[in-house]
């Protein structure tokens, strides 16, 4: 599974990354997590508000810091 957290480098985006990493770790998920702050790469996903979470190429969460439950749902757990 490939997970990307898109953001600007702000505290909200870093918090979203922390939540994603915690859910992946706590559930023993075999996933590659990448944090993308390059605005040109973020724009490739047509995301106008960050943070956003992309799972296997599909934007699942955008414009909010997700809860652990939101991330589990986005990952299909």
Image (spheres, rainbow, N blue to C red):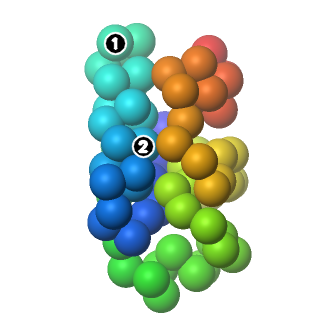
Q: Count of labels shown?
A: 2
Residue furthest bottom as drawn: 40
Residue sitting at x 43%, y 64%: 7
Q: Position of residue 52 (x, y in %)?
A: 56, 55
Q: Is residue 39 visible?
A: yes
Q: Earlier in the sequence, mark 1 or mark 2?
A: 2
Q: Dot 1 corresponds to which residue?
A: 26
Location of residue 24 with respect to 42 vertically, above or below: above
Residue sitting at x 45%, y 53%: 4
Residue furthest front as drawn: 11
Secondary structure state at the residue bearing disc 1: helix
Q: Are marks 1 and 2 in contact (CB under 8 Å)?
A: no
| Category of crowding for the residue at label 1, using alpha-carbon neighbours closer than 10 angstroms: few (below 14), some (14–19), many (at least 20) | few
Tell me: 48 left or right of 14: right
Tell me: 60 left or right of 2: right
Residue sitting at x 58%, y 81%: 43
Secondary structure state at the residue bearing disc 2: helix
Q: Dot 2 corresponds to which residue?
A: 16
Tell me: 58 left or right of 36: right
On-image quarter of the C terminus: top right
Q: Position of residue 6 (x, y in %)?
A: 47, 62
Q: Name the image quarter holding residue 18.
A: top left
Q: Is residue 36 visible?
A: no
Residue sitting at x 47%, y 87%: 40
Marks 1 and 2 sit apart, C-alpha to C-alpha, by 15 Å
Which sits in the foreground, 69 or 45?
Answer: 69
Location of residue 32 with respect to 67 vertically, above or below: below
């Amino acid at each position: 599974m490939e997970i990307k957290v898109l953001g600007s480098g702000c505290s909200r985006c870093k918090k979203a990354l922390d939540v994603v990493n915690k859910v992946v770790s706590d559930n023993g998920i075999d996933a590659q997590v990448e944090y993308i702050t390059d605005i040109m790469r973020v724009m490739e996903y047509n995301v106008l508000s960050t943070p956003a979470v992309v799972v296997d190429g599909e934007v699942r969460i955008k414009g909010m810091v997700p809860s652990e439950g939101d991330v589990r749902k986005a990952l299909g757990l």
